[in-house]
Structure formats: structure tokens, C-alpha cells
Image (spheres, rainbow, N blue to C red):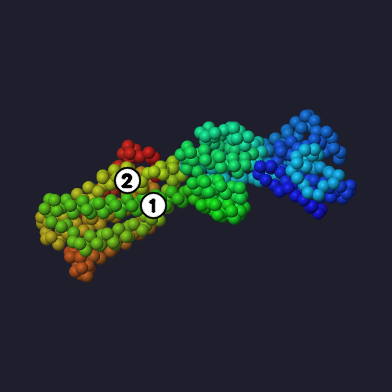
Amino acid sequence: MERFSEIPFSSDAKYMATLHINEESGRPIAYVKGAPDRIIEFCSYVLMNGKPVELNDSLRKEIEKTIEDFASKALRVMAGAYKEFENKGKLERSDVEEGLIFAGLWGMIDPPREESIEAVKNAKEAGVKPVMITGDHAVTALAIAKKVGIIDNGKVITGKEIDEMENPALAKAALKYGVFARVTPAHKLKILKSLKEQGHIVAMTGDGVNDAPALKGADIGIAMGIAGTEVAKEASDMILLDDNFATIVKAIEEGRRIYDNLRRVVFYLISTNLGEILTFMTALTLGLGLPLTPVMVLWVNLITDGACTIPLGVEPAHKDILKRPPRDPKEFIINRVVLVRMALLTPIMAAGTLGLFWFTKQSGSLEYARTVAFTTLAAFQWFQALNARSTFNSIFSVGLFTNRWVLLGIGIAIILQIGVVYTSIGQMLFGTTSLTIENWLLIILVASSIWVADELYKLMGIYKLFAKSVKG
């Protein structure tokens, strides 16, 4: 059927119309489809048994009940209507916003993906509040929101109600109810601004041209990669290639893992370097002499640190990563918990290294004492690599073998340390001497004290005195 004129769909009007020629009567006829609550407003008649009948209150209520029945089954409901003209060249909105003949309803199923239910659950556990903003009928929105677990029972806020609300009431409604229906892009932007004004970090999804302002204004704008327009993609910070909400939750998990690993590496490097500094400062203050030569320090910083640091950067996500609240965006990577932990462990490293240096120096040469101190400091760092894997949880809770790269890195560091101590070239370059089994047992016993102290620190929950979150 040839189309002579068209009124395109808009999110404000919520309908579209096209003009054709009725092949039976030869007269112009407009076909209109859109949101049922809008279409029924424009109708004066209803098609029954092939003939137009006046649309009275009883028939209108019957249609509205059918709309709600469809919507309660999570169907996206659309309505169709038509109107004939004596003579019409171009279709105007005023032509189709009155006097229509209601033709019928149909429902389309757009079921949420199965993984969305688990994703919504994980998002909630992670402290992320999912808010559903849709142009669908309120009953449809409520049915889908219940199905995926956004809400159990609650109220749906409509676009008309949003027009009457201002911040902070709108932000409170978003957090309390979590479902908005029959909204326009302007409403979406209003909700976004109200949440941001209340200090919330907001990620917004969208796919249309009209979503661009909201995507641009969000802390993280997420455009749909499949259904999204180019304008939406340009305005966003991230593009969702599979248009799947579960992928957003996976991105949250990956982002937390990366940040956690960065904190692990920073904690390890700063704590071990502070241990070295404290060792030298204490030795000089007490007049013990230099416990390590410059080349020994260089070896510890480059080889031992390198072998242990790189594996910490690939630590897999811990099982509780999505069960802790989001971190404060104003919080430094070196927070109070990390500082307290450093203050506890760093002196142990310095005291153990200097204690063995002084002890062996009493009965042996300076070269021998420095070899013991050198190996002790390196051993402290092997155990500190295990400590760095988790801020709050025991290594046994995390799983000793969940990051085999750390064990491999420690193993490489041990083998290289043995080479430096026992090979002739290592002894020549580093000024070391061979150690006995008894020396090694004593070194491991002393160096493991840093691991024992950290395990007790976690077991006793001392971190709870300084941490806002006790997960991680």
C-alpha cells in the first residue's frame, strides 16, 4: 500500500501515523499506532463486528482492562486506530489526535535475558541500585521489574508524576521505588540530575538520539552497541557490545579487580621499600654499620620485587568482590587500613633483618652477616607477597593456589637468591658467602613472622577499627 504522508514516532507523542488510499472507498485513510493510553485518548469510535461504534465509558474501561491484563504479563502493548478523510494531501498531528476509530490491541513479548536476574542480584549485593527507566506502560514495567528482581512489590513512578516532582524528592523516589514508566528522554535527564545532585555516582544506559544528553551527563554513559545510534555511542563513555545488562555487572567486577590489584601492588612496593629504609636508618642510628651493600639493595628492589609484583597485578577477582559496597570516590588508594597495616608490618621486617644481622655478626664475618641480612630481607618480601594478596581475608580463605603466578614468582625469586648465595659469580658480584641449612631455617622462621602477624591482624579483625568496608 503506497504511503503518501507520514508523522514519525516521537517519544513525546508516543505514536506514529501514515496516510494511504483506501482501496475499497478510494478515500484517504490514516493509520495510527502507538502507546495504547495515548491512542485511546484520540478515539471516538471502536471497531466492532466490522463496523464503527461510539466509544462509550463502558467500552473504554473494557479496553483499559485488556491493556492492563496484557501489561501484567510483561507484554509491550500497542494499539492501532484509523480515520478516513474526504480529501487529504499532507497529514498533520491535529488530523489524528481526535475522531479516530479504535481498531485493536496487540502485545509483544521482549523477555529479559535469563542472566539478567542473576546480574541484578549481583549488582544489589555490590551496592549498586538498579533503576529501571522505560517508556513502556506502568504495569508492563512493574511486571518486568519484578521478574528480574529490581523490586519485589512497590510503586511505579510515571512521567506525569516526574513532572510534578523536584529534587531531592525525585532522587529519593528513584532509590526507594526504582521503576519509572512512560518517561521521555527529558524525564531521564531530570532523574539523572536529581541523583547526581544528591551525591550519587550514576551510570546511565541509552540507545537513541534523544538519550545523548543523559548519556553525556552521567558519570558513566553506556550506549548499546547493537541497537544504539551513532549519536548515542559518541555521547557515551562505554559501548555495550552485546546490549546485555549482565555485561555491565561483569565490568563492575573487572573494574574492582583492577583497582584492588593496583592497591595490592602499591601496598607491596611501599611496605617493602619502607622496610628497607627503616632497616638502614635503624642500623645507622644504632651504629651497626651497613647491613646490605648497594648492589644487594639493587637486587632486592629489581629482582625480588619484580618477581613478586608482576603476579600481584594479575590476581583474579576474589569471591566476595561483588559483596562489598562501592568505595568512597574521595578515598586515596593508600587509605587508613593500608597505612595501619604498613605501620604494623614494616617494623617487623626491619627488626628481623637487623636482629639476624647483629646476631650473625657476633660470631662471623661482616660478609657472612650481610649475606644473612640480604637473604632475610628477600625472604620477608616473599612472605609479604602472600600478605598483599588480600587486605582483609586470610590467605587460606582466599586460596593459596588461586593465583599460581604469585607462587611461581616467589619460586623464581628463591631460585635466583640461592644462585646469588651459592654460585661463584654471585658471590663475586654481591659479596655473599654460602649459608648452612641452619641459617636457612632461622631465616625462614624469622621472615615468616611478618606473615603470622598479618594473619593474626586479619583474624582478630583489627582492620575493622579503621575500615568503612570489611570485605575484600
Tell me what residue is drawn at x 21 percent, y 51 percent: 278
* Residue 293 visible (yes or no): yes
Q: Residues within 10 Å of mark 2 (few under 14, many from 20)?
A: many
As rendered, which of 47 and 428 lies closer to the eye? 47
Tell me what residue is drawn at x 41 percent, y 44 percent: 329
**Which three-letter amino acid code belongs to the residue tagged 1?**
Asn
Residue at the far bottom in the pictured view: 425
Residue 205, x across and y down, in percent: 56, 47
**Which three-letter amino acid code belongs to the residue tagged 2?**
Val
Residue at the far top in the pictured view: 58
Residue 285, x across and y down, in percent: 13, 51
Tell me what residue is drawn at x 78 percent, y 29 percent: 58
* Residue 355 visible (yes or no): no
As rendered, which of 199 and 397 lies closer to the eye? 199
Q: Is residue 337 above or below residue 1?
A: above
Which quadrant: the C terminus? top left
Q: Residues within 10 Å of mark 1 (few under 14, many from 20)?
A: many
Q: Which residue is mark 2?
A: 338
* Secondary structure type for disc 1: helix
Q: Which residue is mark 1?
A: 261
As rendered, which of 69 and 131 lies closer to the eye? 131
